[in-house]
Image (cartoon, coloured by chain):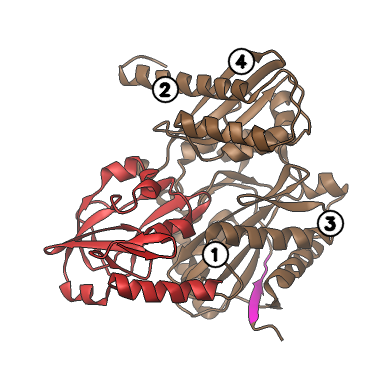
Chain colours: A red, B brown
């Protein structure tokens, strides 16, 4: 686990620039929101996710979340087909803040596995995030 | 010369569908780098607007709106349902998330932009102030609400300002947890919201209000605002997208994609008087969407109940969380409510929630409500 400011980032995960974590198993990924993403957005009150079977495109919006009166987007970290939705988290979005790394949104079967190379490792995300925070200071 | 600049878009009142389509069009065009930072003023023909994830049938009195010619539409932003009268004024800001001086944390952004707006409104004599998390108030009563959304590297923040608000019409247009539309409901709502007309005794010209908002934002953002128009690209996209925003598919949407709600209420006789709560909960009964507290108890300062209601918005039902919030609130607040304690408020809210739970259980068991 790597600590970036007060937030934990597991070393075995990948990260994107939408403050999402990505876990890969074979040709599938699961993803969710990092604790820093939750800090920016606020506690998630509602999640709207696509149906299983939907084709998604990397970096395109594939769902939305509501926190307070803010509507944020969920972005596909890779291209592919949605194979599973985490219904438990749809029913209880309050868990996202409590257990961000167990609160995956959906599972995607990769259609372009090379896209994984564009995601950040924990050490890359640390550098990127610190730069982001500096600009926001 | 300030480096941060904003094009200002203004137009005559538009239909709800047109404004909703423009929201999406400008958001997209800005996120693709095709249009500059933008401040847009909005005036509507009378309409009811629901939040992106709300169920129209639960939030709006659809037959009444149809009968009265009040349009219904869905925002691309979140939050609750709104009634827009002909004089109400909205404004929206479109900018990059990476704009220097604008925090990326949503709550901090709300604070900055609400404070900027309140600062501007003070210039025309309104005692306006930011009320966490995302409202503007005058002496404890809400005068403006805000919301927002994002797309890729851009965000949109929006604000609705009550100019000459018709509370009676709002109570007819929207479905609220208040069980009747009598004078009590109107009085109760008037204790919670106010308008420029009520506060100033007259309705300022819209031009004056807009200048005040620009002045407030300009100071807070250290930005410059200049008049502008929609680009050809935006006009083209607008014409393409308008039919979608006029369609029942957008306005009423899919049944399963919404945050459904349930309403409940309870009365409780505390030593200091009767406490009545009317609550809107999420369908799973896990979250208080909002609560209205009335009764015949005495409370000083008068705003304490409004502040408590505001604190309880979007509170998880889990009794520990709700109760702790109420206890903390009264621990920190210098309020006088003779014969009524934090425990009494916890009791009556819990009674209402338990009522909703047992009603739901009866429903699941095939009983009639």
C-alpha distance separating marks 3 and 4: 43 Å
- Mark found first going from the N terminus, 2 or 1: 1
On the same chain, marks 3 and 2? The answer is yes
In the rendered structure, which segment of residues is drawn in magenta? B4-11
Residue B248 appears left or right of B180: left
- Mark found first going from the N terminus, 3 or 4: 3
**Circle 2: element type:** helix
Disc 1 chain ID: B
Residue highlighted by disc 1: B156
Dividing the image into 4 quarters, which one contains the C terminus of chain B? top left
C-alpha distance separating marks 3 and 2: 47 Å
Question: Is mark 2 in CB contact (under 8 Å) with mark 1?
Answer: no
Residue highlighted by disc 4: B268
C-alpha distance separating marks 2 and 4: 18 Å
Q: Quadrant of residue B366?
A: top left
C-alpha distance separating marks 1 and 4: 43 Å
C-alpha distance separating marks 1 and 3: 26 Å
On the same chain, marks 3 and 4? The answer is yes
- Mark 2 nearby-residue class (10 Å; few <14, some 14–19, many ≥20): some
Residue highlighted by disc 2: B357
On the same chain, marks 2 and 4? The answer is yes
- Mark found first going from the N terminus, 1 or 4: 1
On the same chain, marks 2 and 1? The answer is yes
User: Which numbered mark, 2 or 1, is in the foreground of this view?
Assistant: 2
Disc 2 chain ID: B
- Mark found first going from the N terminus, 2 or 4: 4
C-alpha distance separating marks 2 and 1: 37 Å
- Mark found first going from the N terminus, 1 or 3: 1
Residue B204's disc number = 3
């Amino acid at each position: 686990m790597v600590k970036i400011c007060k937030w934990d980032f597991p070393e075995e995960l990948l990260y994107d620039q939408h403050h999402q974590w990505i876990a890969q198993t074979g040709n599938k990924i699961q993803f969710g929101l990092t604790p820093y993403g939750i800090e920016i957005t606020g506690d998630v009150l509602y999640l709207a996710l696509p149906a299983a079977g939907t084709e998604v495109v990397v970096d395109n919006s594939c769902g939305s979340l509501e926190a307070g009166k803010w509507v944020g987007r969920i972005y596909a970290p890779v291209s592919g087909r949605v194979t599973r939705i985490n219904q438990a988290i749809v029913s209880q979005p309050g868990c996202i803040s409590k257990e961000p790394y167990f609160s995956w949104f959906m599972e995607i079967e990769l259609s372009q596995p090379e896209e994984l190379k564009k995601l950040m490792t924990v050490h890359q995300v640390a550098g990127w995030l610190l730069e982001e925070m500096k600009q926001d200071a | 010369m300030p480096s941060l600049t904003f094009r200002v878009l203004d137009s005559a009142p538009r239909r709800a569908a047109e404004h909703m389509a423009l929201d999406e069009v400008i958001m997209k065009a800005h996120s693709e780098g095709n249009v500059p930072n933008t401040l847009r003023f909005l005036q509507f023909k009378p309409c009811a607007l629901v939040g992106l994830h709300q169920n129209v049938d639960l939030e709006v009195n659809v037959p009444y709106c149809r009968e009265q010619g009040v349009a219904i539409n869905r925002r691309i932003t979140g939050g609750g349902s709104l009634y827009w009268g002909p004089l109400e004024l909205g404004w929206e800001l479109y900018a990059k998330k990476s704009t220097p001086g604008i925090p990326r944390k949503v709550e901090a952004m709300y604070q900055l932009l609400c404070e900027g707006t309140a600062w501007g409104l003070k210039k025309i004599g309104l005692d306006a102030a930011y009320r966490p998390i995302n409202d503007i108030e005058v002496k404890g009563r809400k005068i403006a609400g805000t919301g927002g959304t994002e797309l890729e590297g851009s965000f949109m923040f929006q604000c609705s300002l009550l100019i000459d608000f018709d509370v009676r019409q709002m109570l007819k247009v929207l479905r609220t947890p208040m069980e009747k539309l009598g004078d009590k409901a109107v009085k109760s709502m008037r204790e919670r919201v106010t308008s420029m007309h009520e506060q100033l005794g007259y309705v300022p010209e819209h031009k004056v209000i807009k200048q005040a908002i620009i002045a407030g934002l300009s100071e807070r953002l250290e930005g410059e605002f200049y008049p502008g128009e929609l680009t050809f690209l935006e006009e083209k996209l607008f014409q393409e997208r308008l039919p979608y925003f006029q369609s029942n598919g957008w306005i009423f949407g899919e049944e399963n994609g919404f945050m459904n709600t349930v309403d409940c209420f309870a009365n409780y006789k505390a030593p200091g008087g009767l406490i009545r709560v009317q609550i809107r909960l999420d369908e799973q009964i896990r979250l208080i969407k909002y609560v209205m507290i009335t009764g015949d108890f005495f409370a000083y300062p008068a705003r304490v109940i409004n502040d408590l209601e505001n604190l309880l918005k979007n509170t998880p039902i889990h009794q520990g969380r709700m109760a702790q919030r109420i206890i903390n609130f009264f621990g920190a607040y210098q309020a006088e409510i003779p014969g009524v304690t934090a425990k009494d408020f916890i009791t009556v809210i819990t009674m209402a929630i338990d009522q909703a739970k047992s009603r739901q259980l009866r429903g699941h068991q095939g009983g009639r409500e």
